[in-house]
Image (cartoon, coloured by chain):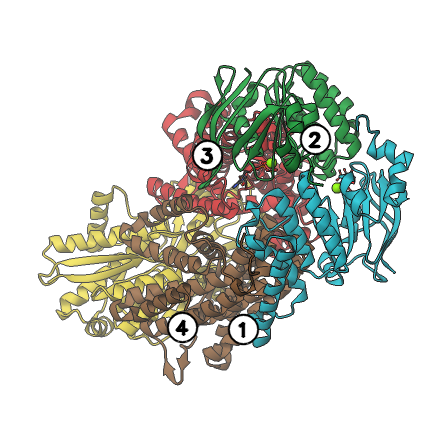
Chain colours: A cyan, B green, C brown, D yellow, E red
Amino acid sequence: MTLLSIENLSKSFGGLMAVNEVSFNVEAGSIVGLIGPNGAGKTTVFNLITGNYQPNTGTVLFDGQSLVGLPTHTIVERGIARTFQTIRLFQNMSVLENVLAGGHCRMRSGSLAAMFRTPTQRREEHESMRQAMAELEFVGLAHEWQNKAKNLSYGNQRLLEIARALATKPKLIVLDEPAGGMNDQETHDLIRLIRSIQDRGITVLLIEHDMGLVMRVCSSLVVLEHGAKIAAGTPAEIQANPRVIEAYLGVDSDE
Amino acid sequence: MLLKIENLRVNYGNVEALHGVNLEVNEGEIVTILGANGAGKSTTLNAISGLVNITGGSIFFRDTALHKLPAHEIVKHKITQSPEGRRVFTTLTVQENLILGAFTSTNTERIQKSLKWIYELFPRLQERRKQMAGTLSGGEQQMLAIGRALMANPKILLLDEPSLGLAPILVKSIFATVKEINKSGVTVILVEQNAKAALKLAHRGYVMEVGNIVLADSAANLLINEQVQQAYLGGGH
Amino acid sequence: MKSSNILYLAFALLMASCPMFLNAYWTDVFNNVGLYTILALSLNVILGHAGLFHMGHAAFYAIGAYTTAILNTTFGIPVLWIMPLAGIMAGFFAMIVARPIIHLRGDYLLIVTIGIVEIVRIALINNVFDITGGANGIFGISRPSVFGYKISKPDQFFYLIWGFAAVTIFLLLRLEHSRFGRALMYIKEDEVAAGGSGINVSHHKLVAFIIGAVWAGMCGTIYASKMTIIAPESFSFAESVVLFTIVILGGAGSIPGVILGAFLLVGLPEVFRGLAEYRMLVFGAAMVLMMIFRNQGLLPPGPKNYDVASLLPAGGRK
Amino acid sequence: ETIRIGLMCPLTGSWASEGQDMKQIVELLAAETNKAGGINGNQVEIVVEDDGGDPRQAALAATRLTTKEISAVIGTYGSSVTEASQNIYAESGILQVATGSTAIRLSEKGLPLFFRTCPRDDEQGMVAAKTLGDLGFAKIAILHDNTSYAKGLADEAKSLLEAQGKTIAFYDALTPGERDYNAILTKLKSAAPDVIFFTGYYPEAGMLLRQKMEMGWNVPMLGGDATNNPDLVKIAGNQASEGYMFLSPPVPADLDTPEAKAFIDAYKAAYGNAPGSVWAVLAGDAYRVIAEAIAQTKDTSSEKLAAYMQKEMKDFSGLTGKISFNEKGDRVGDLYRVYKVDAAGAFVLQP
Amino acid sequence: MEEFFQQLTNGLAVGGIYALIALGYTMVYGVLKLINFAHGDLFTIGAYLGLTLLVSMGLFDKIGPLPAVILLAVMVMILVAIIGAILERVAYRPLRQSPRLSAVVSALGASIFFQNAIMAIYSPKFLVYPHDILPKAAVNILGLDIPIMRIIMFSTSLVLMAALYFFIQKTKIGTAIRAAAIDQGAAKLMGINVDRVIMLVFCIGPALGGAAGLMVGLYYGQINFSMGWIFGLKAFTAAILGGIGNIPGAMVGGLLLGVIEALGAAYISIAWKDAIAFCVLILILIVRPTGLLGERVAEKV
Ligand SMILES: Nc1ncnc2c1ncn2[C@@H]1O[C@H](COP(=O)(O)OP(=O)(O)OP(=O)(O)O)[C@@H](O)[C@H]1O
Ligand SMILES: Nc1ncnc2c1ncn2[C@@H]1O[C@H](COP(=O)(O)OP(=O)(O)OP(=O)(O)O)[C@@H](O)[C@H]1O
Ligand SMILES: [Mg+2]
Ligand SMILES: [Mg+2]
């Protein structure tokens, strides 16, 4: 079943076509990688999916419904969560509070319920707390729950972003360079984490320049260059694609 | 000896991040600093650049006590940095960013020459020279940050994770460039997550753990060091 | 009982005993402090929690006060009955004016809110709809009465005002520690990240505005019935600036901070009365100094407590 | 035993200049009383409180004064400011003599302890309408500044003039505190009035006169009593202010009474110049009225003083003419005079 | 129609002054993101210092009006620049790393302090510049009488704006100023002395405010201690209208605000003129959320 379907998506900034007639599908339950040279338009595609930018033309269908024109928070409610290329945590708030932010859209009680602390409201608060701690446990940050986000190491901040995204109970999670700034050991742990996200039935779409990671976790890859799709296929196919090698991978000189 | 750091201590608020770091760099070397997240690598570079206040120890550049100088004076000794998180001037154009890299220089001819060189190094930047830096893609910003640090024709170049966010093909070319400029006489201190590549490039390396230097050796030795292999070279699998 | 609750209780007891050893003047100073505490707390929802640069809070306060004055003087409705209505009117007004401007950033929002308070003041002065009494304002507003007991002396007002303040503090504390309160903090910290985490940013901002306005409007009722006369100049931009200062100086987003801020900002000029024409000079310098020495505000909000002990995994602590 | 008299005035805020003058005059007069042996042998002490020209602060200042065992209070300037304090004094049973609060309603509330030494807006409105009529103007522009006082006067004059069958060619308000009134003058000019009646305060009047001259438009202008301040001429310049007329209670310099003369001399000796604002002088009159009442009744209770002032004080010789009060506490008698500015910038009392 | 053009020139004259004050405002804002509420009071200080110097030195009699005005302007600008620099050092620098609104409160405190200090030093009375020291002549342009002084003031604003724009956009120091505005740490890494740059900005901004104060004193004659509040607020409005931090924007915003006020007064109502101006401002911001010339930088995530 196709979960996310992107068709003829285009976005320009001034005269620059950042994304040019891109189409691809993401099957439910798969892990798909979006790769390409710097400035190819990968992050822009993510921003178009999550409603941070509006496309000039083209459609984004999620679960059969169009996402174009919807505000970001509605898209999150529909079931797409994301992480950011440059980390965007609530830096001065605690790790737990960061994850609670993700749970927000799955809660209902409003300001009046809060003031009068109705039983439903209390139950809901407790439940979201429990879920947040469970997500922290999942990414391995439970012991840091009181710490301020900005005091976490870079790698842990990336994990916290993932926990926050998971707390929105997504069907699809989009990760923008999750391994950026991680060393080999940490990247290795991340691969395991991404696989267990998949095991929870969540579909993953990710951007990554670390080929080791991409080749190991992705079931299929989409390659962009200059805003346009130049290739798609399994990791093995892509790795052997001369065009991709020329534009993106480069020839291995010494390995 | 070009740069000599002795017993360097740095505090963030009440927390000590560096507990007495000793580090030496000889002229013409590429020295790499390895270490896990939060080990204090960036803090060490920032201490050299004068961006963080140091609470103890000394940093000497030849005979100049850098630890007594404010950041903007240190740059005048031709020590530049491509910082973590890129920190490009988001609402200035690409070209303005680059020109600022040569702020301390008054020789316009020289500046133009450097500019040309950077544009040859990163043709993408030339294409985008009038675009605001903040709207560049992540990798493009990284190129800009490196280019900006090179604009001043540094004697010592501090690179904090230069390959972060760059496409594999560019990572290769960046490392090639570093090698090249090092050959032209620039001393380089390189902080990298990609430890293998860094050690292949460097002459010597240091390994940091929670604010201390725990290992110092030639790069070749470090590459085969068991401990380093375990922790940083993905030797576990 | 949590230690913060003990602190609030001690504060409440101390306050309740105040009129016994204060003379009429100081009691009245405390009344003003109380009014400003409530107003500043209502502004704190918008400015302190949601982080919206709002410097026109007096506009909402004015709507409440004028609603009270008009309904009381023309129809003779007892003022305390009007109080909820005054709040609703102010909240309604806030909803109308805030909706189109809620997406403005920082300083642009600041000037627009200044604009709103000025437009309201000018409208009041020009006797809009012929009901505001123009520059003269409205006089002859009756005093409140509680169960047939008329409130007119400073020490009687003291209990009315501080009673309302206590209710306000109680409710706003709960609000702060809820899904809604957290949403505002996320928005303040990073709007893009908040949106990306599924929080409806503009909706929450708008609701923050409305809640703040409702409270300010109810406060307007108390003010109108305490002064018995209201005039446009009491709701000027300068008044908004005082409220703004209380929140920031006290510690944006911190309820105890805002209370302390109100005591200082309203109390200090009274303490400095002996300095006659130099008192505002000293006051200005004091503001700068306090800000320099406590640049996060006097009592900035601390980390919140969450009861997660029971949720921690058994061997979770590494 | 000392007699304590309160003075509530704006020492800070935008009317600080009036308030500081009030304080100077009242303290000067009290010092003279004390030098002459006090009232019935008792020394006088003036307790000053700053009301900042703001109703809320005034309410506090008033509450504070009520705790200071004062026999009576003088003040203050500005009707809405006074109004915020009225109830407080009334509830504490303290005699209040207002000085620069001309709104009609202040004395219509039936407060037995409230008096004022200044005339009311309706009286000035009447005089204004009459003066404008006497001078033969038919097409009149009225400009106020949207303060409670100026608006009140403008409204009053407008309805009286309309009743007289005059044309009101223009009626609007400027924003006080600005510097450039050319836009307003341009608009006024296109209405082509015979005269401008400006009911606001002297700084704006001065600017209007000056900019009117610079525009080369010489329509006559008449002002209300809030323009009676020598600074008007300083602001406008002699040339622009020549011929400007305004209504005002007489200033001491224009009165022949020994009290007025003595006051002028004492003031000059103490502060080096003639007193500026007539409103501050009216505060001096308030002090003198209270002192007289205490001296005559040999009592300091507010009820006794009020009863005396209302019933027995007749044509008491004040610094601004004879003073008596009616049952509402308003000053009686036609107080208003017309002044005209001469070529040298002096205010000349018109016959 | 003639009245319309007359009102237009009235508006431009007032707008020119708003623009001049707004230039200093926007300049300081651009670098520190600080809404400097004390800016209006620096303007007032300029007016008072101008008067003191004028009276005490008797310049106009000694060297004639034009050189006297220029000399006076230079002296006032230097003095106000010094006060501005001290203000920065004392009230703003300690707050550079704290939340933005803390500095705003410090600025409000400084404003109250200045206002009351002026009152204490110079008395609360209105002070008046000597009359007739400047030419009162008017020139006739297209049937409108326009006082020469207005033309001088207007062109001074224009020239200063152009100079400032050139300085900020085209010079090396200007670029350094803009860089320091974005990221002070990164600016240091370029070798920029951030403290000096900010100090410089805090000399230029207040100097412009001081010059505006002197002009208002010379032209309108009457000054008082609280006049900076209204002018400061208008200048802030103007700066926002044009897009805060943007120098031509301050100019455009100032002139536009002046014209809106004049036309609003002329054709709608004088009493409502400020409300009209604010309504127009709000409408413009609803359509263009970053002001007329402010750049709409979509935040890249
Ligand atoms: N808001 C914007 N305004 C102008 N240009 C933009 C904007 N956002 C992105 N761009 C341009 O669009 C192109 C695509 O950017 P994008 O961030 O999508 O690249 P990317 O594929 O994510 O690259 P990287 O791997 O370096 O992160 C880039 O060249 C960038 O300069
Ligand atoms: N501005 C700051 N405030 C407080 N603590 C900080 C700050 N910057 C760094 N730290 C702390 O200092 C320690 C060293 O950080 P540093 O950034 O130097 O590490 P690093 O080795 O560069 O790590 P990374 O690989 O993640 O870049 C860490 O514990 C970090 O949390
Ligand atoms: Mg990207
Ligand atoms: Mg680092």
Query: Element type at marker 1?
Result: loop
The label on residue C163 is: 4
Whether callout 1 and callout 4 share a subunit is answered: no
| Chain of the residue where label 2 is placed in the rendered structure | B
Whether callout 4 and callout 2 share a subunit is answered: no
Query: Element type at marker 2?
Result: helix
What's the distance in space between the residues labelled 1 and 4, CA to CA?
20 Å
**Residue E119 at x, y percent in the picture:** 36, 44
Determine whether label 4 and label 3 are within 8 Å by CB. Answer: no
Split into quadrants, the picture shows ligand 3 in the one at: top right
Please say if E71 is above or below D198: above
Residue D4 occupies which quadrant of the picture?
Answer: bottom left
Judge left or right: residue C60 versus residue B30.
left
Q: What residue does disc 3 label?
A: E84
| Chain of the residue where label 1 is placed in the rendered structure | A
What's the distance in space between the residues labelled 4 and 2, CA to CA?
68 Å
**Which quadrant is the N terminus of chain B positioned in?**
top right
Q: Does the residue labelled 4 lie within 8 Å of ligand 2?
A: no
Whether callout 3 and callout 1 share a subunit is answered: no
Q: How crowded is mark 4: few (under 14 residues within 10 Å), some or many (20 or more)?
A: some
| Chain of the residue where label 3 is placed in the rendered structure | E
Judge left or right: residue B126 versus residue B205.
right
- Residue type highlighted by circle 2: Lys
Can I make out residue C205 in this image?
Answer: no
**Residue C18 at x, y percent in the picture:** 30, 68
Please say if B109 is above or below C39: above
Q: Residues within 10 Å of mark 3 (few under 14, many from 20)?
A: many
- Residue type highlighted by circle 4: Gly
The label on residue A117 is: 1
Q: What residue does disc 2 label?
A: B196
Question: Which dot, 3 or 2, sits closer to the camera?
Answer: 2
